[in-house]
């Protein structure tokens, strides 16, 4: 087995042990990802910003750092994408940098928490609504149906028995 195939097989094996990022579990996911990339010595792109572009006057040290950073960034991005749930992967914004990828994942996770609390409020409102006779039955049922549609649009399923 050549060295590149071994590295890919090892990465795939380790990726299977990292919890998949689903939009709600950023803290656990990022901790596992950062640990794995650190152990593999691939976390340079997560720890530092992109180095300035090389020029004719760049030193050997700058060229070496740039090469290490590019490798770290490329492999980190692949690993980060491998550890995402497929539902998130398709809608996740594209980026060229691992550090920005982690920032976007954190922002996604924070917005999902807001969505989750909003969904909880809507479910609470739906389950406590009572017909009080102040409007027509049609208006009451329409309002309940609209709340249920809002909950479904957040990706949560609503049991029809709950609505009845």
Image (spheres, rainbow, N blue to C red):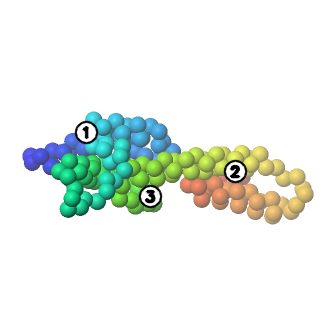
Residue 142 in view (yes/no) = yes
**Mark found first going from the N terminus, 3 or 2:** 3
Residue at 56% in and 55% down: 155
Of residues 117 and 150, the one nearer the viewer is 117
Q: Where is mark 2, residue-wise?
A: 122
State which tag comes first along the sequence, 1 or 2: 1
Could you give the CA–CA distance between mark 3 and mark 2, rounded to whole angstroms?
A: 26 Å
Q: Which residue is depicted at the point 44% across and 60% down?
A: 93
Q: Which residue is mark 3?
A: 92
| Label 1 to label 2: alpha-carbon separation | 44 Å
Determine whether, in the image, residue 11 is placed left or right of residue 25. Answer: left
Mark 2: secondary structure: helix
Q: Are marks 3 and 1 in contact (CB under 8 Å)?
A: no
Q: Tell me, for residue 94, which label it has, or none.
A: none
Give the image location of residue 17, x and y in percent. Answer: 32, 38
| Residue named by callout 1 | 40
Label whose residue precedes the other's in the sequence (3 or 1): 1
**Mark 3 against mark 1, which lies toward the viewer?**
1
């Amino acid at each position: 087995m050549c060295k590149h195939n071994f590295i890919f097989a090892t990465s795939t094996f380790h990726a299977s042990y990292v919890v998949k990022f689903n939009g709600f579990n950023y803290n656990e996911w990022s901790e596992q990802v950062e640990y794995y990339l650190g152990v593999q010595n691939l976390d340079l792109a997560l720890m530092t910003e992109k180095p300035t572009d090389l020029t004719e006057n760049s030193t050997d040290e700058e060229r070496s750092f740039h090469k290490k950073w590019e490798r770290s960034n490329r492999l980190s991005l692949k690993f980060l994408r491998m550890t995402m749930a497929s539902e998130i992967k398709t809608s996740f914004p594209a980026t060229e940098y691992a550090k920005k990828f982690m920032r976007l994942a954190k922002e996604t996770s924070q917005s999902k928490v807001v969505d989750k609390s909003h969904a909880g409020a809507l479910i609470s409102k739906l389950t406590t609504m009572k017909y009080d006779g102040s409007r027509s039955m049609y208006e009451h049922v329409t309002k309940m149906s609209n709340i249920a549609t809002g909950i479904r649009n957040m990706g949560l399923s609503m049991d029809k028995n709950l609505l009845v």
